[in-house]
Structures are given as C-alpha cells and as structure tokens.
Image (cartoon, rainbow, N blue to C red):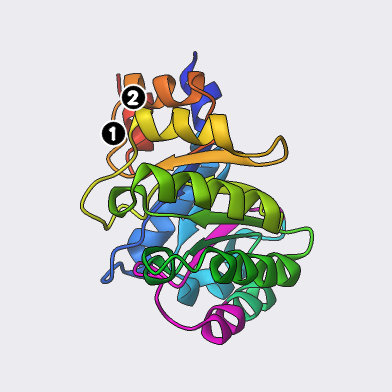
C-alpha cells in the first residue's frame, strides 16, 4: 500500500485545546500536499479554513468533544452551526453515561437527530471503545446502524486508550452494510495505518500523516 493510498483515507487531525492558527494552517497545507481525505479541526477554525482554502477542501470537525455528555440540544446546535460555517463532516461523541445506564435507545435517537441535521453531509459516531464492555460496543454498533450514521469511530484520542484491532474486527462483525469504520487514537506508523485499512477501516484519524512521506 503506497503512502498516497493510505493518505487518501486519513482525516489529518489537530484537536489540541491550545492549537494556534499557524498550526492549523500547517495542518491544512500538509493535507493539500498529502491529499488526505480531510482535516479534522476544532469548530472555531471552520470559517477561516473555508475562506482560506476554498469550497473543495474537505473540513471535518467534532461535536460534543471529547466527553460526549453534554445534552442533545447542545450537540444539535453545535452540529448545525458547524455545517453553516462550512463543515463537510461531523464527528460526534456519544453520551457514554447513557450507554452505562443502558439507555441505548436514547443514544440512537441522538445520533438520528444529528444525522437528520447533517443530511447528505457525513456523520461519524465516536463510541470511545476504551470505556465500553463488549456488549456495549455491540449495542453501539446497532445504534449507529439503526440511526443511519455514515461511520462508527473507535476513539477520540483523548480517552484512556485508542483504536485496537480487536475493536475494529468486532465493529466489522456487528455494523450494517452502509456503515463504515474509522479508527483513531494512537495510530502513528505506516504499518499500523496499513493494518487498520486492511482490516476494513475506511478512515483513520491521525496527526502523524507526515511519517508516510518521510520514510
């Protein structure tokens, strides 16, 4: 698998709380050079990126990030504003407290509402696998599928652990045919990126895309 093939599946990511415009601009310039699938950035930078890089540059942002337990109305408002500002893709974090309380239907309804707001724009659902049991992960695969989201995503990268091959294979077994997989968190080498793509991931969330082109 070539560096270019891998890069085409990467959401080139910078979500640090203190990232500057200079750092964001560097990320975007790298995304253009590497031809990544998108940049994944804080929503406060969407408008500026859209103005600077034009209509064909794919912008992904996060909602309810990184903890997920803000209320649904807040997530919905955040999603709508991000889309108005020019986002193409939304990575939302589920309410993990609802999962722990067994309120799977509530999680599904929230995803459904955000997907309705996104329309034809892409919605990825972060389930933060490091905090879930196997049964909860399977339940989230069903919720994401039933709600019509485009992707299920392993991790925020801010939790206690990131993507694992075990979780990706479990997702692959339990999602519907229209749901794709995004692996994120701790993926820093070409070998790891390749392994996740070969295992069935369609996207990789990564801040280390440059390693592909510096080998």
Q: Residue furthest left?
A: 160
Q: Position of residue 136 (x, y in %)?
A: 42, 51
Residue 114: image quadrant is bottom right
Position of the C terminus by quadrant: top left
Residue 68 on the magenta span:
yes
Q: Position of residue 93 (x, y in %)?
A: 46, 64
* Residue in view at x 64 percent, y 70 percent: 109
Q: Using the image, tell me which numbered label, if any, was put on residue 188.
A: 1
Q: Using the image, tell me which numbered label, if any, was put on residue 192.
A: 2
Question: Against 7, is 131 above or below?
Answer: below
Q: Residue furthest right?
A: 120
Compute the Cα span from label 2 to label 1: 7 Å
Give the residues drawn in magenta, as a range. Answer: 56-78
Q: Nearer the viewer, residue 150 or 99?
A: 99
Q: Is residue 86 visible?
A: no
Q: Residues within 10 Å of mark 1 (few under 14, many from 20)?
A: some
Q: Residues within 10 Å of mark 2 (few under 14, many from 20)?
A: few
Q: Is residue 62 left or right of residue 155?
A: right
Q: Nearer the viewer, residue 70 or 26?
A: 70
């Amino acid at each position: 698998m070539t560096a270019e093939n891998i890069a085409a599946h990467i959401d080139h990511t910078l979500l640090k709380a203190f990232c500057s415009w200079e750092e964001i601009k560097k990320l975007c310039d790298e995304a253009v050079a590497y031809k990544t699938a998108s940049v994944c950035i804080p929503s406060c930078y969407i408008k500026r990126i859209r103005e600077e890089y034009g209509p064909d540059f794919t912008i992904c942002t996060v909602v309810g990030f990184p903890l997920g337990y803000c209320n649904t109305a807040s997530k919905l408002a955040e999603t709508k504003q991000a889309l108005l500002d020019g986002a193409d893709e939304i990575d939302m974090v589920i309410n993990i407290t609802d999962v722990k309380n067994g309120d799977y239907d509530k999680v599904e309804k929230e995803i459904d509402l955000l997907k309705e707001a996104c329309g034809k724009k892409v919605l990825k659902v972060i389930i933060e696998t490091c905090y879930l049991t196997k049964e909860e992960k399977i339940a989230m695969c069903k919720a994401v599928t039933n709600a019509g989201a485009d992707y299920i995503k392993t991790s925020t990268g801010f939790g206690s652990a990131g993507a694992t091959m075990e979780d990706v294979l479990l997702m692959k077994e339990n999602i519907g045919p229209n749901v794709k997989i995004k692996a994120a968190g701790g993926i820093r080498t070409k070998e790891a990126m390749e392994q996740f793509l070969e295992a069935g991931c369609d996207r990789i969330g990564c801040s280390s895309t440059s390693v592909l082109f510096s080998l």
